[in-house]
Amino acid sequence: MAGARRAAVVGIGQTEFSKNSGRSELRLAAEAVRAAIADAGLTPADIDGTVTFTQDTNDELALARAVGIEEIRWASRTPFGGGGASATVEHAAAAVLSGMANAVVVYRAFNERSGHRFGQPKEQVTSPAYNFYFPYGLDAPTKIYALWFQRYMHVYGLTNADFGLYSVVARRHAATNPNAWFHGRPITLADHQNSRWIVEPILRLLDCCQESDGGVALVVTTEERARDLRQKLVTIEAATQSNLIGGDVMFNYYHPDIARFPEAEHSARTLYQQTGLSPDDIDVALLYENFSPIVFYLLEAYGFCGPGEARDFIADGNIGLDGKIPVNTHGGLLGEAYIHGVNNILEAVRQLRGTAANQVPDARRVLAATGRSAVILGTE
């Protein structure tokens, strides 16, 4: 990427993370967006683009009125739920580098705990494809993903206690992060094993991400403009998506080997090819984890360890704050909050600015990755 034009993240903002926000999702989005714009040293009038999720309830024009954005020249949304979290940055970077917008705000806000909760019945099935699964009881993400994870457990000989190794690390990091819902509340492996089963013998309660109320936002513009703004430069070194034939966002059972994560492996190859970097060049990894086993898949897909090696890699202390590759230094979606993974990107920015609660010394390259999208952020 040397010599190439780059986009940059110049502002970040968030609300508090709670279980009952007491206000509308639009207000949460507006609060986070205003905070991100102010953090960048910009005004709402400087923003002319928006990016969010197809699942976000907040209409772009309603948000513009609430915040004071005068004109939107670029508006886009990413599909695939949390799998598209890092794709939001890709959309924003594409807009500013193409000249379609000058400054784009990415936002995600919801009352996921106090509003409609994932797994609760809906009045109608949103996609006819779900009719192939609902009759068999696959009506909640825990059940849907557990079938996938069970193959990994079988192939590599893992038990649920092995997944608890990651949960303990996530809660340890959350315990020293004042933004985290579980601030001050670490757990032990015994606590993990004593938590109730959600899908026996695969997932316990402490393997599952939180249900959170809250909002997060970030502002993206060009590197040239970023150099004139107030925050330390954080550049978007590379961004990508991977959605493969035979894949499925939820029911990802159709690849030949479901003990691996092909979409994540393709994303990793693309990022490393675009940047010339390798796993050894990454200082911090923010890995989307709606459930703890996903971290095992992603550690292997992004090359931090080999297939089937994640259990021992974690057990040997490699993902702790002083490990080979610190992972989810804010506590992740299990420990900080579940804002569909976009809060992971905010943590990536904080690590590069040197302002994270659990700061990794001299962090210069940070990976923020899901299974289907990923970004590498960097600093000078």
Image: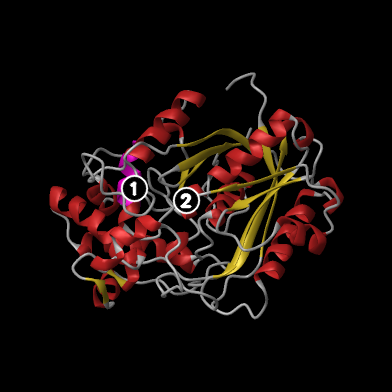
User: Does residue 39 appear left or right of residue 188 in this picture?
Assistant: right
User: Does residue 319 appear left or right of residue 229 in this picture?
Assistant: left
Q: Which mark is residue 80?
A: 2
Quarter of the figure with the C terminus: top right
Q: How many marks do you count on the picture?
A: 2
Q: Which residue is mark 1?
A: 318
Determine the residue positioned at 68% across, 63% down: 29
Q: Which mark is residue 77?
A: none
Q: Is residue 152 above or below residue 101?
A: below
User: Does residue 85 appear left or right of residue 121 in this picture?
Assistant: right
> Regarding mark 2 in the picture, which secondary structure is present there?
loop
In the image, what residue type sits under mark 1?
Asn
In the image, what residue type sits under mark 2?
Phe
What kind of colouring is applied to the model shown?
secondary structure
Name which quarter of the figure residue 126 lies in: bottom left
Number of other residues with Cα within 10 Å of mark 1, as a class: few under 14, some 14 to 19, many 20 or more: some
Q: Position of residue 92 (x, y in %)?
A: 65, 41
> Is there any visible trace of residue 165 in the rendered image?
no
Name which quarter of the figure residue 250 lies in: bottom left
Q: Position of residue 224 (x, y in %)?
A: 76, 30
Tell me if residue 297 is in the magenta stretch.
yes
> Regarding mark 1 in the picture, which secondary structure is present there?
loop
Q: Which residues are magenta?
A: 295-303
N-term-proximal mark, 2 vs 1: 2
Q: Is residue 15 above or below residue 22?
A: above
Quarter of the figure with the N terminus: top right
